Image (cartoon, rainbow, N blue to C red):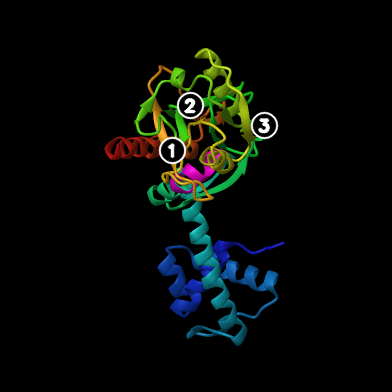
Amino acid sequence: MVRYTLRQCAYFRAVAEHGGIAQAARALNISQPSVAQALDKLESVTGLRLFERHHARGASLTQQGREFLNHVIRLQEQAEQVAREAAALAAETAGEIRLGCFNTLASFYLAGLVAAHRLAFPRVRVTTCEMHMTELATSVREGTLDLALTYDRGADLSGLALDELTSLRPMVVLPEGHRLARGSSVKLSDLAGEPYVMFDGPGSRGYFEDLLAENGMGPEMAFTSTSLETVRSAVGNGFGFTMLVMCPNNNVSYDGKPLRVLRIRDDVRPLGIVLAARHQQRPNGLVAQFAEQAHAFFAHRAKTALHEA
């Protein structure tokens, strides 16, 4: 256990730099006995002999004192850094945010979102992990995550505060040689009777099954995968059409098959992307800042996509 104080170290340094107790006391604007008592206590608890006292000539550092002074200077610098960090934490301009992200969304948004936040708040660390939707909801409820980036359906999100960042309209993906692939949009009824490739991701399967049913469609399930890229590859290889809300910017599957992505002309329900957080009486300032930055990030993405379209 450390038994000396930063104040005693500060008095010791002042005596060392000013050459005596009287000079240090004047510089610090305190009494000489206060300085002398601090030095006696410091030597007692450290077991060091810090000064040679010279009558009428002040005090000079011993070899032990010179070495100890170097440690004291570093200690004071560290203490000042701790004070600055504490002030930043109190002002909520520094700290850590633990962010979870649904697996499917991570490759599209996670790195860009964290990079944008780091640029705006360089003293805030954002630690990330990728999980399934149910794991994300549980982790936020239990407090092991501060926030989760996920869909607004597909898992039990009850009891969580949901902040919608954007909503995504589904798109139809066809092989390039499909009879409808030359257009830029399609009605779902035009695909009646066509085999379907299902993306069996948490939250995604139920969403797409509902959309098909709402439009009076019950297509033959020709291929199913939990991998987004495997689904795209199956479409490229002629297994059927699929619907996705997340599509890479390139229209070629991993195995080199050309694809076409078409807008849906029907009025279909979008899928929301939300930040999920715990309900708190006093909102965490860092979490609020992150949410605000996330809104700006997704708004910029939407504006860029509209401009490119």
Image quadrant assignment for residue 296: top left
**Residue 39 spot, x, y in % from top left:** 59, 71
Q: Which amino acid does label 2 sit on?
A: Gly
**Which structural element holds mark 1?**
loop
The residue depicted at 45 percent of the width and 43 percent of the height is: 248
Q: Height in image: 281 above or below 67? A: above
**Residue 145 spot, x, y in % from top left:** 61, 39
For the residue pair 169 and 286, the one nearer the viewer reads as: 169
Of labels 2 and 1, the one closer to you: 1
Residue 145 appears in the figure: yes
* Mark 3 to mark 2 CA distance (whole Å): 19 Å
Q: Name the residue under label 3.
A: 138
For the residue pair 106 and 276, the one nearer the viewer reads as: 106
Q: Name the residue under label 2.
A: 272
Per the rendered image, the range of residues in magenta is 104-113
The residue depicted at 52 percent of the width and 29 percent of the height is: 282
For the residue pair 249 and 254, the one nearer the viewer reads as: 254
For the N terminus, the image quarter is: bottom right
Residue 102 appears in the figure: no
For the residue pair 91 and 295, the one nearer the viewer reads as: 295
Q: What residue type is labelled 3?
A: Thr
Do the residues bearing badges 3 and 2 touch, measured as CB atoms within 8 Å? no
Sequence-first disc among 2 and 1: 1
Q: What residue type is labelled 1?
A: Gly
